[in-house]
Image (cartoon, grey):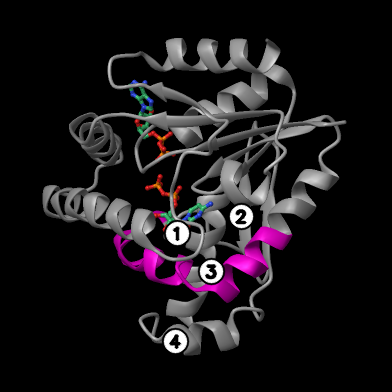
Amino acid sequence: APVVVAIDGPSGSGKSTVSRAVAARLGLSFLDTGAMYRAMTWWMLANEIDVEDADAVATVCTKPVIVSGTDAAGPTITVDGQDVSGPIRGPQVTSRVSAVAAVPEVRTRLVELQRASADAAERGIVAEGRDMGTVVFPRATVKIFLTASQEARAARRAAELRAKGVDEATIAAMAADLGRRDAADSSRRTAPLAKADDAVAVDTSDMTLEQVIDHVVDLVQA
Ligand code: ADP
Ligand code: CDP
């Protein structure tokens, strides 16, 4: 059967960077499921849906056509054919995505697409998010739960935004958002962020990226 590597963890723990590198190294596909929740949120905002109104979000969430390219060398994400890879990382989407992701109908829709991506992957897939090991791929080959201290995660995110030339006020706002989002993601009723019982926990606070990537590759090959 094709390999499924499920990687979960809070914001800034290293999921995207590590998953992409592991997929590239092992010749597997790569799926950033957070980007799908962000794309859904982007569409809601573009269409002036009140994202705090769960019923309104549930009613329209089957409308956008969200497509994620799964090539680890260059992941892509489109909504109704439009490239949204830039705007989905902005502060508007980031501050509202947890509300949209808490709506069960949104999750049903996106989980369906995520499983279809895995089925279409020729050699297998590295999928990262919040519920890969617990809900989407309960029979994954390997499950990893990446963590890092809140300070390490906030510092990484800030460095990343600074390198992109983002202003300090926005960086501070997004740092505040990180803690709020983790709390919301961990306490929601449907598919809360949690370590699967059979996942391996990896604390990356004091590890370099290379160390984390090597360790995850070892776990997959074990
Ligand atoms: P997530 O997908 O979990 O939010 P990312 O992969 O986007 O996390 O990582 C956030 C930032 O932290 C990126 O800039 C990344 O390069 C950096 N990073 C990730 N893991 C490490 C690590 N172990 N050591 C140092 N920096 C890291
Ligand atoms: O970039 P960052 O790690 O901060 O977040 P992300 O992985 O892009 O995910 C953005 C948001 O999508 C999270 O805060 C969750 O609310 C939601 N999400 C989710 O609910 N389930 C997933 N499998 C992935 C993301």
Figure quadrant of the N terminus: top right
- Residue that label 1 marks: 88
Assign a secondary structure to mark 4: loop
- Residue that label 2 marks: 77
In space, the residues marked 4 and 2 are separated at their CA atoms by 21 Å
- Residue that label 4 marks: 49
Relative horizontal placement of residue 161, taking residue 50 as reference (left or right): left
In space, the residues marked 3 and 4 are separated at their CA atoms by 11 Å
- Residue that label 3 marks: 40
Kind of residue at disc 2? Ile
Q: Residue 71 lies in what quarter of the image?
A: top right
- Lower sequence index among marks 2 and 1: 2
Relative horizontal placement of residue 38, taking residue 116 as reference (left or right): left
Relative horizontal placement of residue 152, taking residue 210 as reference (left or right): left
Assign a secondary structure to mark 3: helix
Q: Is mark 1 within 8 Å of ligand 2?
A: yes
103 and 28: which one is in front? 103
In space, the residues marked 1 and 4 are separated at their CA atoms by 16 Å
